[in-house]
Image (cartoon, rainbow, N blue to C red):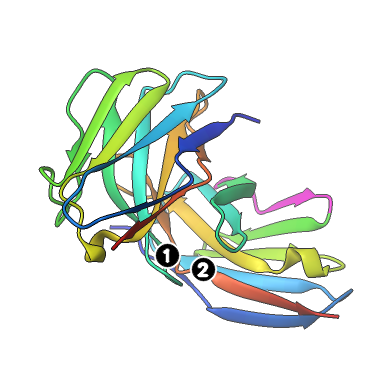
Amino acid sequence: GEDVEQSLFLSVREGDSSVINCTYTDSSSTYLYWYKQEPGAGLQLLTYIFSNMDMKQDQRLTVLLNKKDKHLSLRIADTQTGDSAIYFCAAYGGSQGNLIFGKGTKLSVKP
Amino acid sequence: GAVVSQHPSWVICKSGTSVKIECRSLDFQATTMFWYRQFPKQSLMLMATSNEGSKATYEQGVEKDKFLINHASLTLSTLTVTSAHPEDSSFYICSARGPAGEQFFGPGTRLTVL
């Protein structure tokens, strides 16, 4: 089945760009997602990308997809302290059409 | 965007009691809802898939008699944790599949079993 991997921690300074990376195994995943989770809260959908795209930009967020390497990244420009959270990469891969999540990358933004 | 609510947002109960968690899609109909469990500092693990009008499909290792799921309408799925024990303490998150296949997540329910 699908397996999604991402690094666990990232620390950046306020105003810098953050890049969170993710790899997945199932090349048939049609959609790939980035979710944000703030402490004690549920998941907030940030953005998603179709597998036939290689880039998607949405304000400060840029998603890059390298389908050959099964590598997905999320770039946050001008990172703010409010961006501190855990970011989950997810792909369709479950037998029920459910999402398979990575373990999450904790982004810490230092002032 | 579509909104999914969960109730309650947090609950504390005594060991041996049952707890019901509701998941509602507020502005769309969802034939499929998913229940996830999240342990502290860990990722989300799918527990079961809830389909309106039919029995839920449970993931391997999830006890169907302990985690009862009912999807009685197109906007409501419930998860009942029966005879709860401290090891059931967790963050439970539901999601509802939208019309375009996307998933919208509820805010989660934190269950603490004493």
Q: Is residue A84 above or below residue B19?
A: below
Tell me where residue A62 appears, x and y as whole percent.
75, 57
Residue at image x 58%, y 31%? B3
Q: Residue B46 magenta-drawn? A: no
User: Given the image, what chain letter belongs to the residue carrying mark 2?
Assistant: A
**Which type of secondary structure does the marked residue at label 1 adopt?**
loop
In the displayed structure, does residue B1 sit left or right of residue A102?
right
Where is residue B87 shown, x and y percent of the image?
Answer: 23, 66
Question: Which quadrant: the N terminus of chain B?
Answer: top right
Quadrant housing residue B113: bottom left
Q: Residue furthest left?
A: B65
- Up the image or down, B26 lies above or below A43; here it is above
> Does B35 appear above or below A10?
above
Horizontal relation, residue A12 to residue B86: left or right: right
Residue positioned 32% across, 32% down in the render? B78
Judging by the rendered image, the residue that carries numbered circle 2 is A104
Q: Is residue A103 left or right of residue A18?
A: left
The location of residue B38, given as percent across then percent down, is 39, 60
Q: CA distance from mark 1 to mark 2?
A: 6 Å
Residue at image mark 1: B43
Q: Nearer the viewer, residue A39 or A88?
A: A39
Q: Secondary structure at mark 2?
A: loop
Which residue type carries mark 1? Ser
Query: How many other residues sit within 10 Å of disc 1, few (<14), some (14-19) or many (≥20)?
Result: some
* Mark carried by residue B73: none
Q: Mark 1 touching mark 2, by CB under 8 A?
A: yes
The amino acid beneath tag 2 is Gly
Looking at the rendering, in which quadrant would you find the C terminus of chain B?
bottom left
Residue A55 within the magenta-colored segment of the rendering: yes
The lab-note entry on whether marks 1 and 2 share a chain reads no
Chain for mark 1?
B
Q: What is the magenta range? A: A51-59
